[in-house]
Image (tube, grey):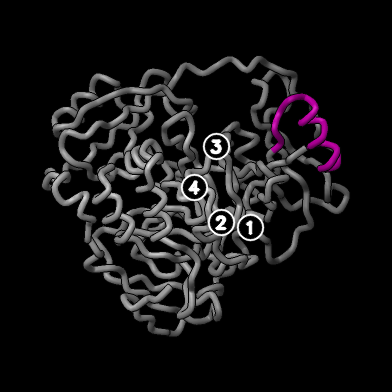
Amino acid sequence: MARTARQLRTASVLGFRTFTLRTAGAFLAFAIVLGSVTGLACVARTVAAEAVGYLAEDAFFTGALGDGLNLGRNLTDKGGSRKGSEQGLYGGSAAIDVCDPDLLIDFLLRAGNGKKKAAWAKALGVGAKNKNVRKFVKSLTEVVLANDTLVANHGFKKGRANRYDAVLEAGTAVLVDVFGVPRVKCNCGNPLAVSEHEPGDVKVEFKGKGKGNKEWKVKKDQVVRVEKAEQPQKSLTVVDVENPDEQVEIDLPEDPDLTVGDDEKDSESPSAELVEIPQTRGLSVADATQQLEAVGLVVETRTVDDPDVAAGLVAGTEPEGGGSVAAGSTVTLLVAAEPTDPGTVTVPNVVGLSQAAAEQEINVAGLVPAVSTAPASAEQVGLVIQQEPTGGEAAAGSTVTLVVGVESVGEEFIGGTETGTG
C-alpha cells in the first residue's frame, strides 16, 4: 500500500541489544529460594501465548488483514512496563507492509457484521456508528511488535467481546494509536488494550499448537507491556526490522481521512461530548456505579472470573477505565465472581528428583509446576533442590514452585519462570 502520509527517517540506534546482567543472576536465584522458603513466592497469572500468524479461537476476523514478520527473536532486550512514547517498542522499515486497515474497515462496516462492529467498538471505547469506526481505524498506524508484548486481547464470543490477557510474539503486526498503544491485532482484527498485569507477574500457556500456534521461548525479562503516553505523539521511533542496529522514525496521522459516504451524512448526528471512564477496579459495585453515573454514563454489570479481585468487587470495565467515550454511552462493570472450588489434591514431595521426573509427578497430581533455577553443588545440578509448597493439600490446578540446581558461574542467564507443559 502507498504510504504518502508516512516519511521514514533512519537514525542510529542507541544501545539496543547491549544490556547484559552479570552478577545479578546469583542474587536473583538466592531471592527465589528465599521466597520459596519463607512462603513469599506468589502464584503467577496464566495468560495465552500467541505466535506470529496464529488465529486464536473466537477471532473477530478471519481474512487476510496481515500476519506480521517472523523475526525469530526480540529486537531489543528491554522489557517491563513502558510508555508508548518510548523508542524501540515496535519494528518497522521503509518497505513494511504488514496490515490492511482498509480491509478491516470494509469488514466492520459490511452488512451482517453489525454485532461484531458494536462489540469491537465497545471494547475500544469507540462509538459504533460507521463514521466513528472509520475515523478510529484511520487514526491508527501499522507496525510490528519489537518484543514479546503483554496485552489485553478480545475475541468475539456469544455476541460480545471476550477479554483475556495474552503475550503476542515479537513480529506480530498490530495497529497502534497516537499514544503508542497497540489497539488492533492485524491478522484477526481483535481489539487490544493495556493489560492490568505486569509482565513479571504472568506465566504463558500455549494452546492451539495443532492450529498453527507454534511454541517459542518466552523470556520474561524481555516481555513488554505498553502504557498510554502522556500526550499524543507525532511520530514513533522504531527498530528497523531489516537492520536492527538502526532506527526508523514513523510519522503518525495528524488529520485522518474522515470522509463519510452519502448514506451517512444525514443519519449521523454531531459528535457527543466525550467523558473519561473512571478507574473502578477494586471498588464496590455501588461505588463504581456512582462514579460512572456521575460523569454521565449508563451502567450495566457482568460477572467475570478474576482471582486477583475479591468476589463481589469490580474487576474493571468495558471499555477499560482511562479511555474516553461519548456521554450517555453504556459501560459494563465487570464484577468478580465467587471462585469455584476446584477441589484439593495431595502435593508430592519431589525434592531430589530430576527436573523431568519432578514435573511429571506434579502434573500427575493435578498441579502445575513452575520452574526456576539456583546455583548448586555439582551433585545437585539438574535436581530439584527446593519446592513450595513442600507437601500437604493444595487446590487442584494450583502452582508448585520447583527450584532446580544449576552450575554456579560468573555470568548467570536471567530468564523467566518456565511453566511445565506435562
Name the amino acid, label 1: Ile
Amino acid type assigned to the residue bearing label 4 in the image: Phe
**Which residue position holds label 1?**
414
Comparing labels 3 and 2, the label whose residue is closer to the camera: 3
Q: Which mark is residue 61?
A: 4
Task: Point out the image quarter for the C terminus.
Answer: top right
**Range of magenta residues:** 353-369
Q: Disc 4 or disc 2, which is closer to the eye?
A: 4
Measure the alpha-carbon separation of dots 3 and 2.
16 Å
| For the residues bearing labels 1 and 2, Cβ distance under 8 angstroms | yes
Report which residue position mark 3 lands on.
45
Q: Residue at x 83, y 48 (%)?
A: 382
The residue tagged 2 is: 221
Pointers 3 and 1 in contact (CB under 8 A)? no
* Mark 4 or mark 2: whose residue is earlier in sequence: 4
261 shown above or below 196: below
Q: Position of residue 136 (x, y in %)?
A: 29, 54
